[in-house]
Amino acid sequence: MPNLRGRQQWPAGRVVSFHHRSDVLLENPWQDPADRLLPVYLPPSYDERSPPYAALWDLAAFTNSGPGHIAWRNHGENLPERLDRLIGQ
């Protein structure tokens, strides 16, 4: 079976998750969770000793979630794959 996604030809970044507790979301009327894991994409060249990087905030739309943007997709690229490609190109 052929590889329909093609081979990645650029370095891959990584995704790390940070726990965040929002006081603003505590006891909100929609009962959204106040505790969340926030995924953060770090480009391949990221080093904690480097100067600060620009930030791109990917805000999930209503009925979606941040983890949904980094999950595997059967068609097209997820967000980390797309960022790897754009940085690599």
Image (cartoon, rainbow, N blue to C red):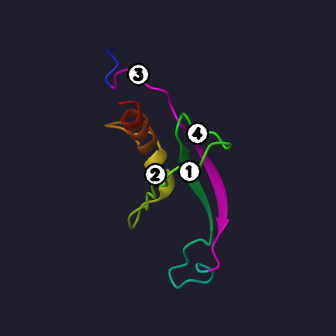
Label 2 neighbourhood size at 10 Å, few (<14), some (14-19), many (20+)?
A: few
Instruction: Decide: is 53 above or below 27.
Output: above
The Cα–Cα distance between marks 3 and 4, rounded to whole angstroms, is 18 Å
The residues tagged by marks 2 and 1 sit, at their Cα atoms, a distance apart of 13 Å
Q: Earlier in the sequence, mark 3 or mark 4?
A: 3
Above or below, 2 against 47 in this view is above
Q: Which residue is mark 1?
A: 40
Circle 2: residue type: Gly
Confirm whether the magenta stretch covers residue 39: no
Identify the secondary structure beneath mark 2.
Answer: helix
Residue found at the far front of this picture = 51
Does residue 8 belong to the magenta stretch?
yes
- Give the foreground label among 2 and 1: 1
Element marked by disc 1: strand
Q: Which residue does the image show at 46% across and 41% down from the upper left?
A: 80
| Secondary structure type for disc 3 | loop
Sooner in the amino-acid sequence: mark 1 or mark 3: 3
The residue carrying mark 2 is 68
> Which amino acid type is marked by label 3?
Gln
Left or right: residue 71 compared with residue 39: left
Left or right, 37 with reference to 59: right
- Which residues are the magenta region? 5-23
- For label 1, count other residues whose C-alpha is less than 10 Å away and answer few (under 14), some (14-19) or many (20+): some
Residue type at tag 4: Tyr
Tag on residue 9? 3
| Residue type at tag 1 | Val
Nearer mark to the viewer, of 3 and 4 = 4
Q: Which residue is mark 4?
A: 46
